[in-house]
Structure formats: C-alpha cells, structure tokens
Image (tube, helix red, strand yellow):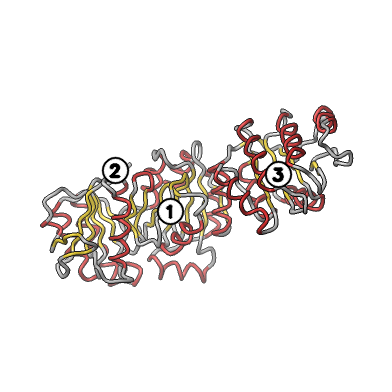
Amino acid sequence: MRDLNKIFNPKSVAIVGATAREKSVGLGVARNILEGAQGQRSVFFVNPNQPEILGQKTYSKIIDIQEEIDLAVIVVPAPVVSQIVDECVQKKVGGVVIISAGFSEIGKEGQIKQDEIVKKVKDAGIPLIGPNCLGVINTSVGLNASFAPRTPKKGEVAFVSQSGALLDILIDGAEDLGVSCAISYGNEADVGLLDVLEWLENDQATKVIALYVEAIKDGRRFMDIASKIVKTKPIIALKAGKFESSSNAVKSHTGSMAGDYKIYNSAFKQSGVIEIESIEEMLDVAKLLAWQNRCKNSFGIITNGGGCGVLATDYCKINGINLAKLSSETVEKISANPVMSPVWSKSNPADIVGDASPMRYKATIEAVLVQEDISGVMVIQTPQIMTEALENARVIIEAHNSFPSKPIVCFFLGGKISQEAIKLLQENKIPNYSELKRGIKSLSFLAQK
C-alpha cells in the first residue's frame, strides 16, 4: 500500500501557479487552501510574476521556500508542468497534485509529456495525483486542495471520481450529507483508484465510499481490494462508458479505455460493490448507508395515507424488500392505545389514517420496533390539515434514539409544509426522501438479503 498521507494530511502546502486573477483556477485553489488551513498547516504561494496574493508573500520558485513541503499543487499551463515537477523533485516534496490539463487525454503528444513527468516522480519516490483533475479534499483535517466551488461540511462519505466536474456536483449535492473526502484522480498517471481505495480503507472519518468510474486499469486487483473493504465499509459505484459511443467519449475525457461493461458489472457483483445508475441515486444510497445500520430484510411501514402505503408496498415488492406480518401482540398493543383510531389497518403497512397525531405515530412506531422480527421501519407522512410535521419528526428522533440498531427511513411527502421537520430529521442523521420510489430503492441496498 502506498503512503499517501503527505497528500491527504499535509503539514505544509505550496500552490505553484497561485494567482490573484479573478475567476482563475489558481486563485480558487489558493482561497480553498487558505480557508481550511487556519493554523493546521503552512501555506505558500509560488508565482514569479506577482509579489503578493491574498495578502501573502509569494515565491518565484518552490525551491526558494526554506521550509519542507509535504504537498505541491501544480496549477500552471501544461508546457510548464515538466519544469515545475523537476523543481518539486529537487525540493523533495512529499506528494504532488497536478490539476493542469493537456496530457494523455489530448492524444499521443500529451501522453508523451505525461510519461516524462511520471518517470520523474517515480524515480524520486514522490506520489502524484492527476494530471487533469479537480484536486483533493479531506474535511477531517481541513484540507481543500482543489478548485471545487465550495468546501463541503464534514461527513462520513468519501466521493472518488475520475471526473472533476462530476465530483463538483456530488460535493454540492451532499450539502446535508457531508463529505469525509472528495478525491479527483483525473488521468490516473501515477496514483490511481486502487491506491486511493487502500488509503480510504484505513481512513477513520470515512464510513462509505462512493465511486464514479470510467475505467479500471487492474480489474483483478480492484476485486481483491474491494472485496476486503466491503466487509467494513460499503462501496457504491456509478460506471460511465457502458456503450461503444460513450466509451469513445471516455478516451477523450481522461485518456482511458472503458472496456466491456458486462465485465465491470460482473466484477462489481462478485466483489460486493453496490452498483447504482445515477448521480441522484448515488447520493440517496450514500446517505442511507452512512446514517443507518445495515440490517436483516424485514421491515414495517407506518403511514397516515393509505394510498401511499399501497404504493410503498408495490415498490418494496419490486425491490425485494420483505414486509413483516404484524404479530397479534403488536396489533393488540397498538389498538389498545387510547390515541389510536379504531379504523387503523391492523396490518403492515400500518395505516394510522389521515388525522394521525404525533402521539399516534409515537405509539405505532414504538410498538412496531419492539416486534423482534422487524428490523426497521419506513415512516410516511402525507400533509393533512391536522398534520404536525415538526412534532412528528421529534417523535421519530426519540424512537431512533431508543432503538439505535433498527433503521428508520422517513418519507415526509409534499413540499413546504415539512421543510423544517425534514431539516431536523437530517440533522439527527435520519434520512428523508421526497419520493417513495427513490427512497425504497435505496433501502433495498441497506437490507441484507
């Protein structure tokens, strides 16, 4: 396993190509690095043409910096990169991230330039991420060595992507979820997906790993590494380049060959990787796996809308989710509670009818979770005139605290009425989905079948 700590947890960072020019990558990286540093690391700007950037003195060359440099982030035009790498080797930096594009993704000439750079860093024993990448983020140590539009809040999901732009979408979309690491590896010239996976296996802040993959260079090694990791951390994968037309696009994007999709699909299944189909689904599944425990496939549904209960039942059937039969003891316990409507369904889904109060939700959720063969519950709320969304959320949080090993997945449906309640749920790591089909498909990956 390669030592990537100087890249992901550097004590000193130099940005070569930092600039004060607005709307530039160099300025974006400089701002992001400074924002997270806050005394945790030394930051140096290298630009021979600007004496000061963001109120900080600059250096003409990285070798002019007296202190040791753990990480060098290179943001200069492609023709200059080789010279900068020579200086990084001379400086004996701990690791390099090359954000600059113009290498293997543009064809033979770019490949030659890339190969020259890789030989230099390999001979010097310096790990290199990139070129042609967004950069790297590690929120647990306040590192944002990228030109992402913002720094995500801390979380438990690591997003790893060949595409920098797609990683930007995931970072922005994970606002509620949070991020442990966001890693763009671009052309994968030196450090690749498999090296990153091995590092993330031991990263204490990461609970779930989510991958955007265009091509995997060593399928057998990927399967070996992934099979080991999934025993403790789920891996989610979105594979792009499934067809011949899109495979050609992959080659022009990162200079990689996508290969036969059937092989990827089989490799994911054999190694226990969860393959999903969209960016939206990646975020849905990541949230559920990060916030709730995996469990046996036996669930209850509680709803204040009978139609939604029927739809949920259909989606459970489609996605292989088992709905447990409510025991006679559970039915009797719920029916005996004075807050319960006499016309509730007395079955699973437990339809507690449209005028359900928070206390009715509380009585039903607790009774269902007590039933031994039920491993988790789906709670559906439809917006009726008597619905108390915020109080319902508090009841659910209390139940989750009382039964922490049994996942609770919420569906507060509708729009504006439930926004404050949904925010409260997700602040307490209880996932809410605005659409039954999406959430129940995600739940199918939580259930151990």
Q: Which residue is mark 1?
A: 152
The residue to which callout 2 is attached is 3
- Residue 126 in view of the camera: no
Say what amino acid the circle numbered 3 marks: Val
Residue 94 placed where, x, y %? Answer: 22, 48
* On screen, residue 99 above or below 391: below
Check the image and name the residue furthest to the right: 343
Give me the disc on residue 285: none
- Percent across and percent down for residue 20 are 25, 68
Q: Residues within 10 Å of mark 1 (few under 14, many from 20)?
A: many
Q: Separation of disc 1 and disc 3 at Cα?
A: 29 Å
- Label located before the other in sequence (2 or 1): 2
Nearer to the camera, 277 or 408: 408
Q: Answer above or below: position of 14 versus 448.
A: below
Residue receiving disc 3? 379
Q: CA distance from mark 2 to mark 3?
A: 45 Å
| CB contact under 8 Å: marks 1 and 3 | no
Residue at x 62% of width, y 54% of height = 419
Image point 44% across, 50% down: which residue? 153
What residue is drawn where x is 55% and y is 54%? Answer: 282
* Residue 130 seen in the figure: yes
